[in-house]
Image: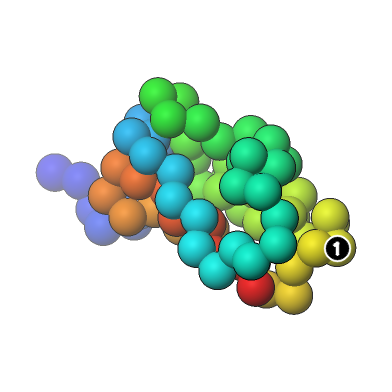
Amino acid sequence: MLSLSTLALADTVVQQVRITGNKRIENDTILSYTHIKPGETVSDDVLNQAVKELFMTGYFTDVKVHKEGTDVVIEVE
């Protein structure tokens, strides 16, 4: 039996990466900073690193990266 904490930390094979809130930076540019691609396995550590990388660009005032099922959603402002 798996606990909820184990499920939350499980790695996920990404089916799709969705970007929301983007107004001025190309989606491909955002993806290049995150290193997250469909078909790859991502962990919570990878998602946290993507947030840091996007903040370090200086392009955004707020960044959130999370999983929705097998999709990764990147929210930027």
Secondary element at tag 1: loop
Q: Is residue 35 above or below residue 18?
A: above
Q: Residue furthest top?
A: 39
Residue beneath disc 1: 58
Q: Is residue 50 above or below residue 75?
A: above
Vertical placement of residue 38 versus 4, above or below: above
Color style of the picture: rainbow
Q: Give percent across and percent down for residue 37.
A: 51, 31
Q: Quadrant of residue 31?
A: top right
Label 1 sits on what residue type?
A: Gly
Q: Position of residue 19 (x, y in %)?
A: 50, 55
Tell which of 21 and 73 is nearer to you: 21
The answer to whether residue 59 of the structure is visible from this angle is yes
Residue at figure coordinates x 84%, y 55% from the top left: 57
Give the residue drawn at x 76%, y 50%: 53
The N terminus lies in which quarter of the figure? top left
Q: Quadrant of residue 11?
A: top left
Q: Is residue 33 above or below residue 65?
A: above
Looking at the rendered structure, the number of numbered marks drawn on it comes to 1
Q: From the viewer's side, name the closer residue of 59 and 44.
A: 59
Residue at x-position 26% and y-position 57%: 4
The residue most toward the left is 1
Q: Residue at x 40, y 24 (%)?
A: 39
Crowd tier of the residue under label 1, counting other residues whose Cα lies within 10 Å: few below 14, some 14–19, many 20 or above: few
